[in-house]
């Protein structure tokens, strides 16, 4: 665990830069994290982030791509458009949640 | 009489019934196991069938013969669990009442879930080895295949036995080499993960073995559909991987009755407490083995260690006491790497596979995360242990909890950062 400063916010992160304390997250932090991976947040992104955080609070796990897709009725294809290349990890990163547990 | 109903007579369900039969008073507790057929398969054997080192008959025995006297075995298809009325209905109309229910119906491959997979190429140039019938068909397909692009593919995690596709790849590479065809066959390993395996140190070591054998690895590949005309896998991010022979691991899902009964998650796995296997929101339903959503490998070794913990907890639970034993997610898997060698990995919820010796520190005789002949011999000896020690519920001198003795942690490296 280390701390890093992103967009003026001091954040506790793991080796890969994922936030380790979900309570350090707010909308400003989300905007700053999204900027790091070249994503500009719009309302659709924000709705997805809210869903991820609510699921994480409910189950204690970062939701998978499938969970987000079925839970929000969004096609996986659309998630790839909104968070290109590695959507599961990128969604978790911007939502201030741990990396989705590498399924074992 | 109290009724314990076990759904599924596979690895986990059989061990639960056999172990509890010895621990529960025959005059007080009736144990019933339900399964849809009477064929128990030694599923690790599926991996050998395509290469002709095991025949379908070698891996199949009767289910009821594995189940102890004093346990009732019912053959039937489960329609639904009515948790409120505490009963299970079968499709033939049979109603089975329970006081405690154990769901051990595992997971199964769903090729239909990927668009285009079961089209014209299915069972011609597209195969799978997660069913005995599929593994048998693949044997013929491999025999006919002498030249071209072999693609080994994982659709989505989690899958049963997550090391099996890697093992298949290693064995296929060695097999083509043995037949003098290696130069004519291009092998690609396609995974939705960011590396060859899920945890960093094992991913690095296994990735290195793939590299050594000139097997190309395509990572972070989430398949959208199979294009029949191009004979290619197509991903959501637009990558195309053409094949002449595709060996895919289809999406794995828990049993459909779990969804119909309102007991499952998106993939029909039963959400449970990962330490006790008690289904969330229920006091009389457990799920054990591949059927649950615990965050560790779906594997027979996990079922074995889990059942050891479960049995003690179950006795406390029915006595009205709190359950005091906690499962740590312990898994222990042989990984066949070809040429008569294998690796061994040992890990749990928190500790990733590490190098070292097993089961005894320094002495082994098994070596963790390294290719040895002894590890391969261990895997060869395993079917006997499975049928004669594990399934009957006899004690195996291996503790259920993972041990750190004999292990050492090199500096972790992350495959993402390579």
Image: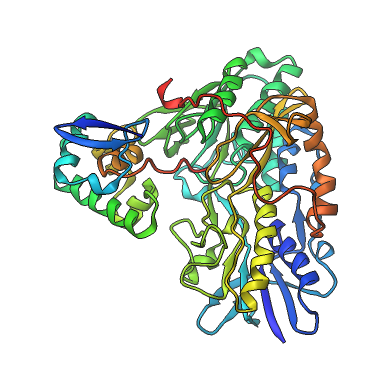
Q: Is residue B391 left or right of residue B193?
A: right
**Quadrant of res B219:** top left
Name above or below for residue B14 compared with residue B76: above
Check the picture and name the quadrant holding the N terminus of chain A: top left
Q: Residue at x 82, y 32 (%)?
A: B377
**Quadrant of res A58:** bottom left
Q: Residue at x 68, y 66 (%)?
A: B312
Q: Position of residue B166 (x, y in %)?
A: 61, 31
| Colour style of the rendered protein structure | rainbow
Q: Is residue B202 left or right of residue B219?
A: right
Front residue (pair B405, B289): B405
Q: Is residue A38 visible?
A: no
Front residue (pair B220, B270): B270
Q: Position of residue A29 (x, y in %)?
A: 18, 40
Name above or below for residue B113 compared with residue B358: below
Q: Position of residue B200 (x, y in %)?
A: 50, 30
Q: Residue reaching furthest top?
A: B183
Q: Is residue B86 visible?
A: yes
Q: Is residue A89 left or right of residue A42?
A: right
Front residue (pair B320, B105): B320
Q: Position of residue B92 (x, y in %)?
A: 65, 78
Tell me how many marks there are.
0
Q: Residue at x 78, y 79 (%)?
A: B25
Name above or below for residue B19 compared with residue B212: below
């Amino acid at each position: 665990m280390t701390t890093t400063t992103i967009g003026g916010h001091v954040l506790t992160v793991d080796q890969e830069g994922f936030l380790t304390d979900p309570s350090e997250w707010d909308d400003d932090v989300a905007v700053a994290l999204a900027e790091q991976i070249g994503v500009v947040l719009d309302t659709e992104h924000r709705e997805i982030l809210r869903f991820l955080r609510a699921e994480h609070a409910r189950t204690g796990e970062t939701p998978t791509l499938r969970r987000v897709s079925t839970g929000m009725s969004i096609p996986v294809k659309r998630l790839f458009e909104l968070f290109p290349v590695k959507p599961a990890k990128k969604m978790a990163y911007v939502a201030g949640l741990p990396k989705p547990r590498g399924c074992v | 009489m109290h009724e314990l109903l076990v759904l599924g007579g596979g690895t986990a369900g059989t061990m639960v019934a056999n172990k509890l039969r010895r621990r529960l008073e025959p005059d007080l507790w009736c144990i019933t196991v339900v399964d849809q057929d009477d064929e128990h398969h030694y599923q690790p054997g599926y991996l050998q069938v395509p290469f002709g080192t095991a025949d379908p008959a070698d891996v199949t025995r009767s289910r009821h013969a594995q189940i102890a006297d004093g346990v009732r075995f019912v053959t039937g298809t489960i329609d639904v669990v009515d948790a409120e009325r505490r009963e299970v209905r079968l499709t033939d109309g049979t109603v089975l009442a329970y006081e405690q229910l154990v769901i051990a119906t595992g997971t199964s491959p769903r090729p239909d879930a990927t668009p285009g997979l079961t089209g014209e190429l299915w069972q011609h140039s597209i195969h799978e080895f997660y069913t005995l019938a599929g593994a048998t068909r693949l044997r013929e397909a491999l025999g006919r295949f002498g030249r071209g692009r072999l693609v080994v593919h994982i659709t989505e995690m989690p899958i049963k036995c997550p090391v099996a596709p890697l093992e298949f790849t290693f064995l296929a590479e060695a097999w083509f080499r043995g037949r003098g065809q290696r130069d004519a066959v291009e092998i690609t390993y396609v995974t939705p993960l960011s590396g060859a395996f899920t945890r960093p140190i094992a991913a690095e070591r296994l990735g290195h073995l793939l590299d050594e054998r000139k097997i190309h690895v395509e990572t972070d590949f989430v398949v959208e559909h199979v294009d029949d005309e191009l004979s290619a896998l197509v991903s959501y991010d637009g990558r195309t991987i053409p094949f002449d022979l595709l060996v895919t691991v289809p999406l794995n899902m828990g049993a459909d009755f779990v969804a119909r009964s309102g007991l499952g998650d998106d993939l029909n796995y039963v959400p449970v407490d990962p330490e006790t296997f008690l289904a969330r929101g229920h006091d009389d339903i457990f799920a054990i083995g591949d059927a649950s959503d615990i965050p560790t490998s779906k594997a027979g070794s996990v079922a074995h260690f889990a059942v050891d913990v479960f049995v003690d907890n179950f006795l406390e639970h029915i006595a009205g006491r709190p359950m005091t034993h906690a499962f740590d997610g312990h898994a222990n898997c042989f990984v066949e790497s070809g040429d008569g060698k294998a690796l061994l990995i040992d890990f749990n919820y928190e500790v990733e596979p590490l190098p070292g010796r097993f089961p005894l520190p320094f002495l082994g005789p098994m070596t963790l995360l390294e290719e040895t002949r002894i590890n391969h011999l261990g895997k060869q000896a395993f079917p006997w242990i499975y049928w004669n020690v594990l399934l009957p519920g006899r004690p195996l001198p291996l503790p259920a909890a993972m041990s750190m003795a004999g292990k050492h942690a090199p500096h972790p490296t992350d495959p993402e950062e390579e």
